[in-house]
Image (cartoon, helix red, strand yellow):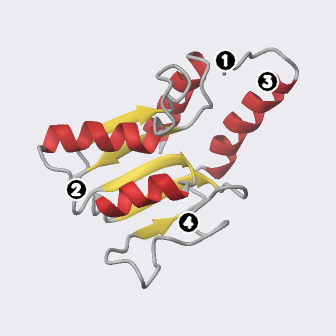
Amino acid sequence: MRLALEQALRAEASGEVPVGAVIVDSHGDILGSGFNRTIQDHDPTGHAEVVALRMAAKKMSNYRLPGATLFVTLEPCAMCMGAILHARIARVVFGAADPKTGACGSVIQLSQDTRLNHHTDVVGGVLEQECGDALRTFFRRRRSKEIKIES
């Protein structure tokens, strides 16, 4: 999770919402990493998880990543959980819950929906305080106009 937090800081440094993600294989080797890039790439799918998934899939020459674990600083949204499930990620570990768009239990629970053909284990609250603080600080600064977000 510390590596995901480093990615989140990279997002913040580039003017993005500070969310970072890292994907590791079953041996702990890093397959991919990423941070939010929605603003700089003008891409609504440029969430940290999707960026990391793209990198890992390229590295493995396969869109499926069975046995992999995705660490992310914020609970994934429905779009990201859809991609995570499609990639057959075995486990998602997230830091801060997202009470507005979280798809791992905060708003909806996609990871264990019996109507879907793949399920993934989810662990939340890892380094929750640090992950949440990064987001709270960012949005506090943004509201006070210290940070300008381009639209």
Q: Nearer the viewer, mark 1 or mark 3?
A: 1
**Counting residues from the N terminus, which is met first, the one under dot 2 or under dot 3?**
2
**Counting residues from the N terminus, which is met first, the one under dot 2 or under dot 1?**
2
Residue 111 position (above or below residue 101):
below
Q: Secondary structure at mark 3?
A: helix
Pointers 2 and 3 in contact (C-beta within 8 Å): no
Residue under label 4: 104
Q: Is residue 87 visible?
A: yes
Q: Looking at the rendering, in which quadrant would you find the C terminus?
A: top right
Q: CA distance from mark 2 to mark 3?
A: 36 Å
Q: Secondary structure at mark 1?
A: loop
Q: CA distance from mark 1 to mark 4?
A: 29 Å
- The type of residue carrying mark 2 is Leu
Tell me what residue is drawn at x 83 percent, y 29 percent: 140
**Label number found at residue 142:** 3
Task: Give neighbour class at mark 3: few <14, some 14-19, many 20+ (Cα, 10 Å).
Answer: some
Tell me what residue is drawn at x 73 percent, y 28 percent: 138
**Counting residues from the N terminus, which is met first, the one under dot 1 or under dot 4?**
4
**Left or right: 102 with respect to 2?**
right
- The type of residue carrying mark 3 is Arg
Q: CA distance from mark 2 to mark 4?
A: 19 Å
Residue under label 1: 150
- The type of residue carrying mark 4 is Cys
Task: Where is residue 36? Give x, y as percent.
Answer: 51, 32
Task: Where is residue 72? Give x, y as percent.
Answer: 49, 47
**Left or right: 123 with respect to 52?**
right
Tell me what residue is drawn at x 35 percent, y 39 percent: 52
Task: Give neighbour class at mark 2: few <14, some 14-19, many 20+ (Cα, 10 Å).
Answer: many
Residue under label 2: 65
